Amino acid sequence: MAIYMGLDSSTQSLTAVVIEIDGDERRVLDQRSIRFDEELASYGCRNGVLTHSDPLVAHSNPVMWAEALDRLFAVFAAEGQFPLDKLRAIAGSGQQHGSVYFNSEADPRLSSLDPARELVGQLEGIFSRPTSPIWMDSSTLSECEAITAAVGGSGELASLTGSKAFERFTGPQIRKFHQEDPEGYDATSRIHLVSSFMATLLAGTDAPIDPGDGAGMNLMNLREKDWAPAALEATAPGLSGKLPAIEESWSIIGSLSNYWVERYGFSPATRVVCWSGDNPCSLVGVGLVKPGRLAISLGTSDTLFGYLPEPRVDPAMEGHTFGAPTGDYMSLICFKNGSLAREKICKASGLDWNGFSAALRETPPGNGGAILLPWFEPEITPNVQEPGARRYGLSEDEGPANVRAVVEAQMMTMAIHSRWMGVKPESIYATGGAACNKEILHIMAQVFDAAVYQFEVGNSAALGAALRAYHAAEMETRGSSSWEEVIAGFAEPVAESRIAPEPELVALYDELKEIYETCENHALNGGPDPMEKIDAFARR
Ligand code: ADP
Ligand code: XUL
């Protein structure tokens, strides 16, 4: 019998999934979260983000993420449902793209933390940049343009790194830091991602970055899975000396540092495995270790992703190709106005989630043609810099119609902007916080013309990390480990949760998707007015 832990340091919370594997016997022993806004309110974050006067800027506090880790382990020590000293390996998942900046104090400090004192007090003075830009930041347009020009164009950068320059990606964020605070940049000895930062705290030694999270930086050569000198040079001087190594997702960093062992009673033999991004971990957590299926995560961001055996880059360059924790690749598209947009409409309509679901049940599919472009925040896909929702044939105060409109819009935009992946899925695996909502998934099934499934463990990123911990421990001791065997019994969809597409509704949404595209084109590119089409749809 052995126990494995997967952690997910996400935008709004730190979550752990603890699993036990004894041959074919597999079960979840513990799952819990620390929510930043509620439990670490003194950091002043809203939805995990520090408030800022510029709506394009989104930073968070790395000390808050560290304190969450300390608190979570304290909870495990006090009331955990598993023996801490039996934990064989621990791996993790981090919100992607976000970065943490250490000065030269960090190394000696983190390798000799005092178990008698809380973690947070011991982190003072180790950061060369006090806050961390995260994936919601879209303030680096000029840096994206400069990097793109320096490497020879968007196509060049996309084929080298898997993505054209995106504002939230780490390279443009690093460039901005160097431009705005050259002294702070010079004082930086190490730049970590959220994932490698958290792994460094656990291991007490400088952690590597894996090709899953490394591909979200505009700095990694996607095929070689190593830093791309041309991209580094285009970003900031002396960058190669400030980045950690890139290593396979199953590499072992070392064992849990003395701090965790002495303070909480973990075993000094517990292996710390390389962390990855939340989306690559979710790929494993929903069992996508083979092509042909897609997953949609409805978390703070909505993401749509699938496994790729070979790197394949989006010709329209709206999506991304990342490394997968299996050693292969994955395609991904990210939509920023995910859960927070649903929450906004839910609140504005005076509803809770039950009321939100009831509104979906009570309104007609297609909403009589009413369309909402749900860009409350600047949007990633499609690129929208000027935030503001747009409405066609819909008034802001029609609560239930707005509820339907936001969900239909989100599903249609995902279907439209994922065509490049060239996958017509028969099944879609739904995960993330909103995947518990059957009414939302019903619309997903109709818009994608695919059967939609839920999972027993909704925390697919944390579960995927726990499964990666098992895989890495097996690789270390036995030299091999089959992914099919790793995911068996955990990352399997619940058969009874199947929601089927209905031909009549599929046809209706095919028509509505065309209208939605016309609205997007009208709002973003001054294309033709969609109202005539909307009126015709309403009369049918
Ligand atoms: P994260 O990206 O932080 O990991 P989660 O995947 O945990 O986020 O999702 C959290 C979100 O799930 C909440 O912000 C909330 O909007 C959403 N959520 C929770 N329950 C429901 C529900 N019944 N219906 C729709 N959305 C829900
Ligand atoms: C993916 C992305 C988000 C973050 C936050 O590119 O930006 O999904 O990983 O969870």
Image: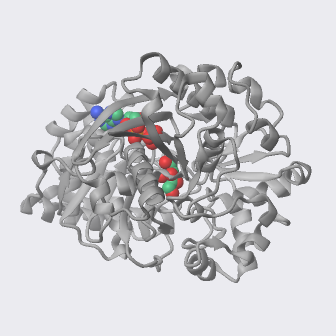
Image coordinates for residue 351, horizontal then vertical, percent: 31, 26
Q: Quadrant of residue 305?
A: bottom left
Which residue in the rendered view is the most extreme toward the right? 183
Image coordinates for residue 443, horizontal then vertical, percent: 21, 51
Residue visible at 76% across and 78% down? Answer: 150
From the viewer's perspective, is residue 106 above or below residue 170?
Answer: above
Image coordinates for residue 87, horizontal then vertical, percent: 45, 36
* Placement of the C terminus among the 4 image quadrants: bottom left
From the viewer's perspective, is residue 472 above or below residue 157?
Answer: above
Count of numbered circles in the view: 0
Image coordinates for residue 39, horizontal then vertical, percent: 53, 20
Q: Is residue 398 visible to the viewer in this orientation of the structure?
A: no
Q: Nearer the viewer, residue 376 or 155?
A: 155
* Colour scheme of the picture: one colour
From the viewer's perspective, is residue 227 above or below residue 276?
Answer: below
Q: Nearer the viewer, residue 47 or 363?
A: 47
Q: Nearer the viewer, residue 172 or 83?
A: 83
Which residue in the rendered view is the most extreme toward the top? 78
* Placement of the N terminus among the 4 image quadrants: top left
Q: Is residue 430 left or right of residue 302?
A: left
Residue visible at 81% across and 40% down? Answer: 108
Q: Is residue 139 visible to the viewer in this orientation of the structure?
A: yes
Q: Is residue 322 left or right of residue 44?
A: left
Q: Quadrant of residue 505?
A: bottom left
Residue visible at 47% across and 80% down? Answer: 315
Q: Nearer the viewer, residue 393 or 344?
A: 344
Q: Is residue 457 left or right of residue 110?
A: left
Q: Quadrant of residue 130?
A: top right
Residue visible at 36% across and 67% down? Answer: 307
